[in-house]
Amino acid sequence: MTDLPRLIATEEAFAPREYIDAFLDLTKSVDTATSRYLAIYYRQAEAVRQLTDLDYRIAEMDAHGVDLHLIGITGPGVQAFDAARGTELATIANDTLAAAIGRHPTRFAGLAAVAPQDPAAAAREVDRALGSLGLNGVIINSHTHGEYLDDPKFWPIFEAAVARDAAVYLHPTFPSDAMIEPYSKYGMMGALWGFGADTSLHAVRMILGGVFDAFPTLKVVLGHLGEAIPFWLDRLDNRHANIVRRGGLGPLGMKQLAKSPSAYFRDNFWITTSGMMSDPPLRFCLDRCGDDRVLFAIDYPYEQTAEAVAFIRAAPLDRATMDRVTHANAEALFRIAPLALRRAAVQGV
Ligand code: MN
């Protein structure tokens, strides 16, 4: 048993109790498909406990040999609110998470919530959370009231993240109010299809919008094996080049890019296995992105720990690749100290 690779899960959700209460309060005045969907979920006691009681998950981690959760605020998170309330809830979320990491320093690491509604405040929160709170990266739950991070007004957040060398986890949320209607039937607005559709749109907007020409060292993480983008890399390059060749830059509002779209994906993106528990897409993504770019994730509490762990333990990977995917890539990207060092720090040796 001692030879099993250490398991770090990198897209594990939580929510401070204040967020759940604020969201349920918001649903009294704001009636959208998203608020109706989540209000049902947030009234289920077990679901709320899994999100809000950060000590509760330790038993499930122990039962399945998960060594560490990299924890981030669940979607839509603080981005559901106005700028002032969102900023306040981000501070609460990050303080709550830092306290939990303090209680369980060998079991938890954390991603900082920020409210892009106030980009300057969000940039300051990145600095505080990565600085004095010691968190390990940033999480942004895709669009903010229908606005995407390719808009330069949000770029102070990237400036702060790059200054701290903090990876930004672009986590899914529901399609925006302007986009959600076609997703509103057949249960498609959530993880079944809408999450991935919105998050892949967001990442491609960032690439085509020149975010990575402005921030060449920015690190972005996508869950769900890259939200299908690895499958589209050749077509993105082919169609982008085709439009440029036909003089479409101006008419189609395109930006001149220094590199091909796929080159940014390979240079600036990391992907995790959250919610994807099948060998063929894992092997494909390792082939397309490289074994230093794929990280294990569960997506607690939305996915089953037992299923995700059984999948990765049995994945057809050589030991070096298995070690990278299960923990070494996460340790490097999120500056999570190897277990022995974390234990030693706790014991004061
Ligand atoms: Mn998730």
Image (cartoon, rainbow, N blue to C red):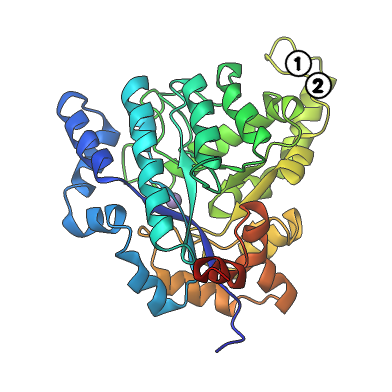
Badges 1 and 2: C-beta atoms under 8 Å apart?
A: yes
Secondary structure under the numbered disc 1 in the rendered image? loop
The residue at label 1 has a CB less than 8 Å from ligand 1: no
Q: Is residue 237 left or right of residue 307?
A: right
Distance from Cα at disc 1 to Cα at disc 2: 5 Å
Q: In this view, does 19 lie to the left or right of 100?
A: left
Asked if 40 appears above or below 85 in the picture, the reply is: below
Q: Is residue 82 visible?
A: no
* Pointer 2 residue: 244
Asked if 341 appears above or below 109 in the picture, the reply is: below
Q: In terms of image quadrants, where is residue 88?
A: top left
Q: Which of 304 and 73 is in front in this view?
A: 73
* Pointer 1 residue: 248
Q: In this view, does 30 lie to the left or right of 267?
A: left
Disc 2 marks a residue whose amino acid type is Val
Q: Which residue is drawn at 29% across and 65% down?
A: 56
Q: Nearer the viewer, residue 170 or 188?
A: 170
Q: Residue at x 75, y 58 (%)?
A: 290
Residue found at the far front of this picture: 348
Q: Which of 164 and 86 is in front in this view?
A: 164
Q: Residue at x 17, y 53 (%)?
A: 44
Secondary structure under the numbered disc 2 in the rendered image? helix
Disc 1 marks a residue whose amino acid type is Gly
The quadrant of the picture occupied by the C terminus is bottom right
The quadrant of the picture occupied by the N terminus is bottom right
